[in-house]
């Protein structure tokens, strides 16, 4: 079952799968160009590192 979140990086609601993809790209586990949105890695890292919906980072 998919969840939706308000993404502070994109300033819109996204599903948890796309959130996970953005986070993976931010941490260098996939290419940023694979995302549907044009996002700079450094900007994504800034947001993803502090995001409560980050599914990779242990808090």
Image: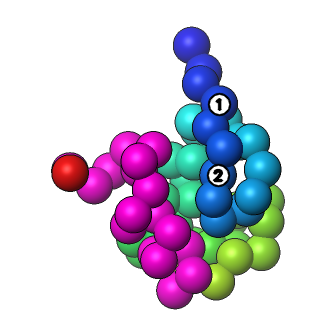
Q: Is residue 44 magenta?
A: yes
Measured along the vertical axis of the image, is residue 50 above or below residue 21? below
Closest to the observer, 29 or 3: 3
User: Splitting the image into 4 quarters, where does residue 1 fall?
Assistant: top right
Q: Is residue 33 left or right of residue 25?
A: right
Residue at 65%, 30% (x, y): give it.
4
What secondary structure is found at the residue carrying circle 1?
strand
Give the x, y percent position of residue 13. Answer: 74, 42
Residue at 38%, 67% (x, y): give it.
49
User: Splitting the image into 4 quarters, where does residue 14 fall?
Assistant: top right
Q: Is residue 24 visible?
A: no
Q: Which mark is residue 7?
A: 2
Measured along the vertical axis of the image, is residue 48 above or below residue 56? below
Closest to the observer, 38 or 45: 45
Give the x, y percent position of residue 18. Answer: 63, 46
Look at mark 1 in the image and give the residue it sits on. Answer: 4
- Range of the magenta residues? 42-58
Q: Is residue 52 visible?
A: yes
Q: Is residue 10 left or right of residue 54?
A: right
């Amino acid at each position: 079952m998919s969840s939706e979140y308000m993404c502070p990086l994109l300033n819109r609601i996204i599903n948890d799968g796309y959130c996970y993809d953005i986070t993976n790209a931010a941490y260098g586990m996939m290419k940023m160009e694979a995302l549907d949105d044009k996002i700079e890695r450094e900007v994504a890292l800034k947001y993803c590192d502090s995001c409560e919906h980050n599914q990779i980072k242990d808090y």
